Image: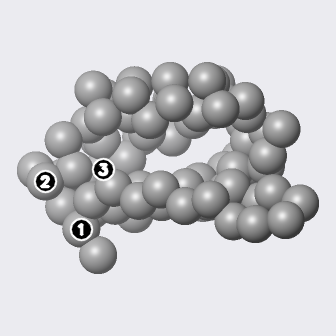
Amino acid sequence: MPLYIVVYDIRVDKPTQKVHDFLKGYGKWVQYSTFESVLSTARFTGLRRRLRKLINLDAASGFIRCRAILWDRWRFWEWGHR
């Protein structure tokens, strides 16, 4: 299973705390807004789906980036403003 690096930057405090608390259930908190998670493809798909229901990034003005570290390639998923 790949190691996912999840990084977020949300400019509104309440949604930031919601995302932080949510991601604690999926992996290890390694820095202020960075988590590491070893996830199957199905669990990662579930994480993305639940994040979209949890927060409206357009209203919160932020982004969430997920990168998968695989043995032979990178997988990338990004949601929100740059």
Q: Are marks 1 and 3 in contact (CB under 8 Å)?
A: no
Location of residue 79 with respect to 47 vertically, above or below: below
Q: Which mark is residue 58?
A: 2
Instruction: Kindly state the secondary structure of the residue where label 3 is placed.
Output: helix
Q: Which numbered mark, 1 or 3, is in the foreground of this view?
A: 1
Instruction: Kindly state the secondary structure of the residue where label 2 is placed.
Output: helix
Q: Distance of mark 2 from mark 3, alpha carbons? A: 14 Å
Instruction: Kindly state the secondary structure of the residue where label 1 is placed.
Output: loop
Q: Which mark is residue 32?
A: none
Residue depicted at 27% across the width and 59% down the height: 80
Q: Amino acid at mark 3?
A: Asp
Q: How many marks?
A: 3
Other residues around mark 2 within 10 Å, as few (<14) / some (14–19) / many (≥20): few
Nearest the camera: 32 or 40? 40
Q: Which residue is mark 1?
A: 81
Q: Earlier in the sequence, mark 1 or mark 3?
A: 3
Q: Amino acid at mark 2?
A: Asp
